[in-house]
Amino acid sequence: MSTSREGDLPRTLMQMAGAPSEPPPLGETALVLIDCQREYVDGALPPNGVGPALAEAGKLLAAARAAGAPVVHVVHRGRPGGGAFDPEGPYFAEADEVAAVAGESCIEKALPNAFAGTDLHQTLEGLERKQLVFAGFQTHMCISSTVWAALDLGYASTVVGTACATRDLPDGGGGVVAAAELHRAELVALSDRFALVVENSSVW
């Protein structure tokens, strides 16, 4: 089924539905930072462009705090005693650019979707926020799966593209899908129905 007339540029389902093309005021949202941990900085899974993405996430965090938006820090908890995101190891902590301060919610997860098996939904209900802003890692996995789930739970999401990143992946046929290509494709897919995607925090 086509979503545009022949000769026209394609449109997203959100555009066709007349969804807002600008994000809500930052102070009316909750910022959800996902897996901004040292495992992605100097651990086993560094995404391409993690430094610039963390820098942009830091700018976004500062803007959210200044606007009075509540901040929820979600971190991935692996198995103790070794492996990625080991809670007893040096790479479990959040990166310095986005470290939580007193009064900000911190939630641990064990699955890509940050709503699965956690109290994220209940936390957001307590904050009385239905509009969410997302940043973090990785675009193709934890960001995407959480934003998909957010729609099912009645949230409206905005994803800050340059505050997210991912890594190269094998394509299953002996080649590689470059991180930049994968990142862009995931953001495009999210923008069709699941989220408003903005480039950076300057939109606020």
Image (cartoon, rainbow, N blue to C red):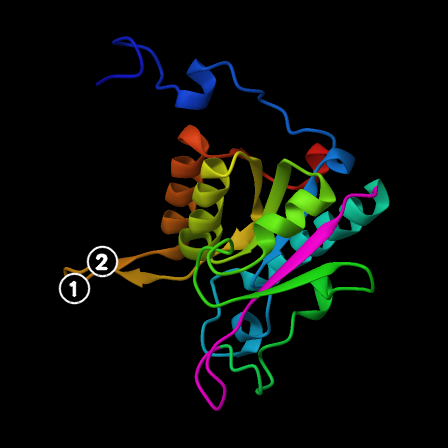
Query: Residue 102 versus residue 143: which sits nearer the camera?
Result: 102
Contact flag, marks 1 and 2 (Cβ < 8 Å): yes
170 relative position to 165: left or right: left
Spatial CA span between label 1 and label 2: 7 Å
Q: Which segment is the magenta one? A: 68-84
The residue that appears at 43% across and 42% down in the rendered structure is 148
- The numbered disc on residue 171 is 2
Question: For the residue labelled by badge 2, is the local secondary structure a helix, a strand or a loop?
Answer: loop
The residue that appears at 56% across and 36% down in the rendered structure is 155
From where the camera sits, is residue 111 visible? yes
Give the labeled residue for mark 1. 174
40 relative position to 27: left or right: left
Q: Circle 2: is it few (<14), some (14-19), or many (20+) Cα within 10 Å?
A: few
Q: Circle 1: is it few (<14), some (14-19), or many (20+) Cα within 10 Å?
A: few
Q: Position of residue 46 (x, y in %)?
A: 48, 70
The amino acid pointed to by label 2 is Asp
- The numbered disc on residue 8 is none
- The secondary structure that most of the magenta stretch takes on is loop
150 relative position to 167: left or right: right
The residue that appears at 51% across and 53% down in the rendered structure is 115
Q: Position of residue 126 (x, y in %)?
A: 71, 46
Residue 79 belongs to the span the image colors magenta: yes
Q: Position of residue 66 (x, y in %)?
A: 85, 45
The amino acid pointed to by label 1 is Gly
The residue that appears at 25% across and 9% down in the rendered structure is 6
